[in-house]
Amino acid sequence: MAETICRSLRDGSLEGEQAPALTIKDSLQSPLGSHVFDHFLSTLVSHISAGRSQASGLVLVAFNRSPSFYLDLFKRKGLDASPVDKSFRILDCFSDPLGWKDRLVDSASAEKSILKDSATVFKNVRDVNKLSSSILDLGNGFIGEGKVRFAVAIDLVSNMLRHVSLPSVAGLLNNLRSNDRISCIFWLIHSDLHEPRASAALEYISTMVASLEPMMQSSDGQKTSGSLLWLEENSRKAKFHVRLKRRNGRVKLLYEELHMEQAEIRFEAASSVKTIVDQNLLPRVQFNLQLSDKERADRSNVVLPFEHQGNGEAIQIYDGRRSLSEGQKDPHLMQPSAFSHKMDAQSNNDKGEIHYIRDSDDERPDSDEDPDDDLDI
Amino acid sequence: MRGFARRERERGDMNPPSNLLDEALGLGHGGAIAALPAGRVVLVEDCVETSGAFVLHHLLKRALSAGEGGGDVLFLALAQPFSHYDRVLRKLGCSLSVQRNNNKLHFFDMLKLEFPGLTGGNDIESGFVGLYSKIQRAIEARRSKEYSRGCITIMIDDLSLLEIAACGSIDCVLDFLYYCISLTAELDCSLVILNHEDIYSSEEAPRFLSHLEYLADIVIKTEPLSTGLSADVHGQVCLLLLNNTIDHFQQRDFQQTWAFNEQNS
């Protein structure tokens, strides 16, 4: 599933169509969204550097982490510096998003951009139009054959939403998607920092939605210091749900498990064996609602009435029309009578029994007559 | 809590090298005193029943007592005057007066901090810009000294009072924090924030506290004991390591909980 997303980002958009857009969505309960974003980012940059993708370059709009973090990320991933420099640009909205540092030196211009290695500092994140044009300007710098397209990545839309309204952000993303020079676009959002409508709005304009959910759900819905196993498990693993919208309108739902090991991310096919089950499923009441091992074994050995055995012997189903006196057994019956006061078990002691005790012994047994006998059909 | 037994440590006796909290934070390897590594954002969350100020005091002492690899501290004091911290740290064996005179401690007395926000949000933002400028100038002044190469720790005590000074503008407080965090990346600083998690209303609390937890690499929560006994002198510290990419912490358990008791009020 993650590979599917990587391929889709690598292949980019078709002529005349909007670019594929990916939303990565996480929460504090499963806070691995940044690692997923880093994974897709480094994979796509690797494809771009090697010339295997439609995009000739990638523009990263960095709100959440410094440009140096991403350069170190590529080094850790073993990407060569030279090809990366040619195909990677950072619009730095982390260092000075509101232009405060310019005001420290009493600068007259609040929107001065300083080119610093591969990062361009952007100082007015509240101006969406300026942000959009800056992204496109950076993308124009990529060199390639024929029509040059580039990819766009936004490391945290949640930070954008702090400064700009949801309609403006949605409009920016939609305009980028509609631009014929954009090969693909993807972003990360922390769903628990916004109202549900914000996540919904972004999902509507996405062709792919990757949601991270905790492996273990907490009982009260919030982290507590007592839920150590819950916190630890969800810090290293998550459920990775992907929803893909096809061009033909079909929606495909996929599911994987995500594991973090030594700062590396790994996707695995979902395994029910490895799923950790919350043991506290039963409500905490004064009654004993659990079964002992012997009780579970006895329950599994119970032969239910009218249950087909399929053991090679002739099977007869008791139709309930004949009443049996107490203690009498019909030798043709394979199943115990359902109308006896007590259902006698087989002589085999291994089989379980069902003991039915009437509420009142004075109560007459149910009539043996079939109520439909008087029908004349 | 895997593989760790609860141990009781005295608040006034957190000397290296046997302190579990220091081990978990990566301070004091091999018996040497060390400050927080650069680039770290530590969030200390406490509640009315159990104050987390002692964690701040401990980290302050560690930062000022660090050897040649240690750095300076910028302390934004909104909760208590200098005399209070001086008295507390003296009991821990550290003289803030001496450190301040040696320019290792930059104490910002902000007890009466109030941003002129009555006329509009821009004034509040201007107030934070002014505060940030003081911090950046102080850091750059220290960095210009050739002998100052260690990590500079910025401490805020406490964030809720900063919000009050900003007339309840959480957005401005978050903007200010983001700018302080940018210093952790650019100027080799670390950031320690004390916040009270039980003072926010049910509507605003989840998102603001979530914002803070997303920003933090390490969350230290102080709570009363689960038994509720002796809440004024006993408690437990829960440490959450939230950033899996911190190589230093990869060998450690994700979350550890210790009990502590207090001997000195």
Image (cartoon, grey):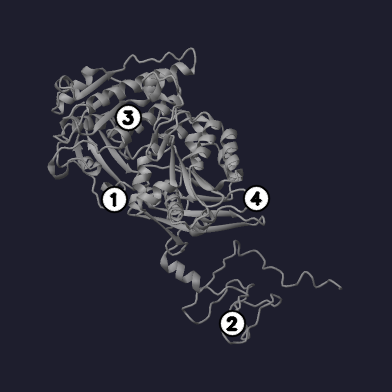
Residue of label 3: B194
- Residue A329 located left or right of residue B195: right
Q: Which one is nearer the viewer's eye here, B15 or B191?
A: B191
Between marks 1 and 4 in the image, the one whose residue lies nearer the viewer: 4
Secondary structure type for disc 3: strand
State yes or no: discs 1 and 3 in contact (Cβ < 8 Å).
no
Residue that appears at 32% across and 34% down: B186
The amino acid on which the numbered mark 4 sits, given as a three-letter code, is Gly
Residue that appears at 58% across and 47% down: A206
- Where does the image place residue B66, in percent across and percent down from the top left? 16, 34
The amino acid on which the numbered mark 3 sits, given as a three-letter code, is Leu
Residue of label 2: A310
- Where does the image place residue A254, in percent across and percent down from the top left? 54, 58
**Disc 4/disc 2 C-alpha distance (Å):** 62 Å
Between marks 2 and 3 in the image, the one whose residue lies nearer the viewer: 3
Residue of label 1: B250
**Disc 1/disc 3 C-alpha distance (Å):** 25 Å
Residue that appears at 59% across and 87% down: A313
Marks 2, 3 in one chain: no
The amino acid on which the numbered mark 1 sits, given as a three-letter code, is Gln
